[in-house]
Amino acid sequence: MAVIMVVGVLGMTLTSTVQRNVRAYKLGKISHQTLLHNNLVDVFGVLVTMALAILAGGYVSRYVSQLAGKAAEASSRGSGYTAGMLAGIFAGMLVGIGIGYLVRWIWRMFTKPKRAFPSTNRS
């Protein structure tokens, strides 16, 4: 089930990314070489981001679910599994979102066009 979800999200993300680049190409804003370059960079970035989010989220969720499960089981008998599962899902989700934002920030540092001079038009 998880593989189907990952493939679905990856497909939707890559489709929207490639469509954005193709739209810019059709409008004449970018050349054919730039289209290919942007698509390769975007696909690589999405794959790296998803791999990091899955790996880090999996490790953190496993660790947090064990801790929360033991703590809940110590306080209330029979609630350790549910508490551990919910805590693991929540922790994994937060780590995945955090990795996504971190990679986005780093990616923008490398791909952001630099201006030669600051804008003097201050309204």
Image (cartoon, rainbow, N blue to C red):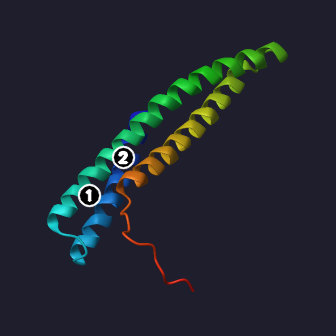
> Which residue is drawn at the image coordinates 48% and 81% (left, top)?
120
Mark 1, secondary structure of its residue = helix
Residue 88 on image: x %, y %: 62, 28
**How many labels sit on residues?**
2
Give the number of the disc on residue 70.
Answer: none
Residue identified by numbered label 1 = 38
Judged by depth in the image, the label closer to the viewer, 2 or 1, is: 1
Give the left or right position of residue 39, taking residue 116 as reference: left
Near mark 2 (Cα within 10 A), the count class, few <14, some 14-19 or many ≥20, is some
Mark 2, secondary structure of its residue = helix
Residue 96 on image: x %, y %: 52, 39
Residue identified by numbered label 2 = 46
Q: Amino acid at mark 2?
A: Val
> Which residue is drawn at the image coordinates 34% and 59% (left, top)?
17
Q: Observer-nearest residue: 90 or 1?
A: 90
Quadrant, the C terminus? bottom right
Give the left or right position of residue 122, taking residue 40 as reference: right
Residue 63 on image: x %, y %: 60, 20
Q: Are marks 2 and 1 in contact (CB under 8 Å)?
A: no
> Which residue is drawn at the image coordinates 77% and 20% (left, top)?
72
Q: Earlier in the sequence, mark 2 or mark 1?
A: 1
The image quarter in which residue 89 lies: top right
> Which residue is drawn at the image coordinates 33% and 53% (left, top)?
14
Q: Observer-nearest residue: 68 or 29?
A: 29
Above or below, 21 relative to 109: below
